[in-house]
Amino acid sequence: MKSVCVFCGSNTGTRPAYREQARRLGALLAREKIQLVFGGGSVGLMGEVADAVLGAGGQAIGVIPHALEARELGHERLTKKYVVGTMHERKALMASLSEGFIAMPGGMGTLDEFCEAVTWAQLGIHAKPCALLNVEGYFDSFSGFLDRAAADGFIKREHREMILIDRDPEALLRKMRSFQPAPAPRWVEPDEV
């Protein structure tokens, strides 16, 4: 894996562990020579991950819409920054630049980005690993929701199982590297979404 897209909050949250794990993940990506692809902001967990990657000598690629660049304080020290027109363009470009996806704690935007990446995998648009870094149990309820949705017939079991989850960045990265997607028919072409 040469590049990973990290979805996370533009805030740091209330628990110190969120920042600590963001920094730990960033340093790990740099050490493993995995390029970070992220939302391009200098604030929140986004900024923490990017700063840790860059501080450890790694590469960080940011993708940020024009409208959010000033509001989210677009990161100025990136290896490369793409400024795009819309959130849709942002997600599509981040997906095309990445070989896998990790969601860290965040809000609605983080869930939106992660769920879209998972949906694209479910539809056979890509076969990239989708993972949750479950810092201090942040995604426990979301994982329970997914289990319920699978049990109640709204998510196929194989689609539920393709969402990797771990509390430890190193263990999560190992799971992503060994990920074998279930064979899935392509429901739509990428240009149709």
Image (spheres, rainbow, N blue to C red):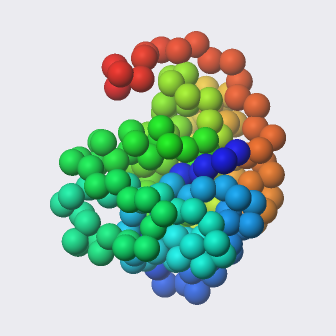
The residue closer to the viewer here, 91 or 118, is 91
Name the residue at 55% across, 44% down.
Answer: 98
Asked if residue 148 can be seen in this view, the reply is no
Asked if residue 90 can be seen in this view, the reply is yes
Give left or right: position of 103 versus 2.
left
Q: Looking at the image, is 29 positioned above or below residue 136?
A: above
Image mark count: 0
Q: Quadrant of residue 53?
A: bottom right
Q: Measuring from the top left, give residue 14's x and y in whole percent.
A: 49, 84
Q: Measuring from the top left, give residue 37's x and y in whole percent.
A: 51, 55
Q: Measuring from the top left, give residue 150's x and y in whole percent.
A: 60, 34
Name the residue at 68% across, 66% down.
Answer: 30
> Among all residues in the image, which is located at the extreme left?
67
Name the residue at 28% across, 55% down.
Answer: 83
The residue closer to the viewer here, 20 or 63, is 63
Q: Looking at the image, is 27 positioned above or below residue 109?
A: below
Q: Measuring from the top left, give residue 169's x and y in whole percent.
A: 72, 64
Q: Quadrant of residue 172?
A: bottom right
Give left or right: position of 192 versus 148.
left
Q: Quadrant of residue 6?
A: bottom right
The residue closer to the viewer here, 28 or 140, is 28
Name the residue at 53% across, 15% down.
Answer: 186
Q: Looking at the image, is 156 positioned above or below residue 114?
A: above
The residue closer to the viewer here, 134 or 83, is 83
Quadrant position of the C terminus in the picture: top left
Give left or right: position of 133 versus 95.
right
Quadrant position of the N terminus in the picture: top right
Give left or right: position of 9 versus 186.
left
